[in-house]
Image (tube, helix red, strand yellow):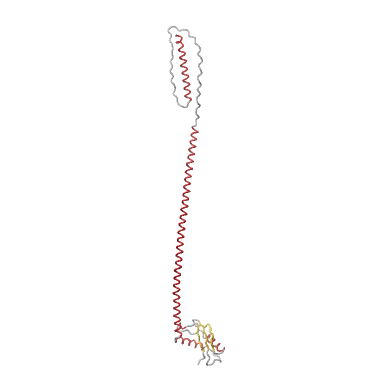
Amino acid sequence: MSRDSKNLGPVGMAFALHIVIFGSMVVAFDYARPMPFTPLAVQATLVQEIPDTAPLPPPRVEPEPEPEPEPVIEQPEPEPDNSEELRRQAEEEKRRQDALLEQKRLDELKKKEEAERKQRERDEAEREKREEAEKERKRVEAEKKRQEDIRRQREENERLRRELEAEQRQSEIDAEERRLAAANSPAMVVYQNTIMQRIQRNWAMPASVTPDTSCVVMVRQLRTGEVISARITNCNGDDAVKRSIEAAVMKASPLPEPSDPDLFRPELRITMRPPQ
């Protein structure tokens, strides 16, 4: 019993040492992990026996048995620090998402611009169509108005023509009536006798003229009385008589003017006889 009591101290120390070693290993393991750890508090009691008498010779210390090797606990390899890679991947993913969003925005903007361009083209085409329709309408109206003006002008011209023709016919009728009236008037007899006297004064009668000589001469004159031509149409005299009468008419030019313009005739039929 006393021997067991003497061996209790070394055994306790060995036990305490083992506890300390085990605690150190636990602490080292905890430090190896990338997480915080809580140190283990180790309590040990040192037992020392106080001898009652004089010290005895130290007991023979038997060699302590070799401690069994502690099992080797394979510590897990620390996870590699891939935070930088994750950050890079996150940034790359963000850039990709931003690029997709930007591309989507550009596509939508392009679609919007294309839609606006097509709408502008449709609006422009519609505007041009309306303008063409308006131009065509105005052209048709202008052509219609032109045709209407032409029709009215033709009608007015026709009315004026009819009026003018009617006036001309009436003027001709009036002139013919005046001519007929003048031809049968005493003034016409006076006018013709005046012309005949003018011609007779210029007639150099040849010896072949007899008291019964009678020649009809057609005289053409201008309004001024200037003789254009003289032509014998009927005569019982010889050629010398005819030539003398024609020469007398031409020499009498210009013939006397009538007192009344209605008495003027561009062609006169005069019968020439020798004076009695």
In this rendering, is residue 86 above or below 137? above
In the image, taking residue 238 as reference, residue 264 lies left or right, namely left
Q: Position of residue 157 (x, y in %)?
A: 45, 71
- Residue lying furthest top: 54
Count of all numbered marks drawn on residues in the image: 0
Q: Position of residue 180 (x, y in %)?
A: 45, 83
Q: Residue 244 falls in which quadrant of the image?
A: bottom right
Where 264 falls versus 112 (above or below)? below
Vertical order, 149 against 260 (above or below) = above
The residue nearer to you, when weighing 227 against 62, is: 62
Give residue 254's position: percent from left, percent from top. Answer: 50, 84
Quadrant including the N terminus: top left
Report whether 23 appears left or right of 239: left
Q: Nearer the viewer, residue 23 or 149?
A: 149
In the rendered image, which quarter is residue 170 located in?
A: bottom left
Where residue 114 sits: x, y (%)? 48, 48
Say above or below: 207 vs 42: below
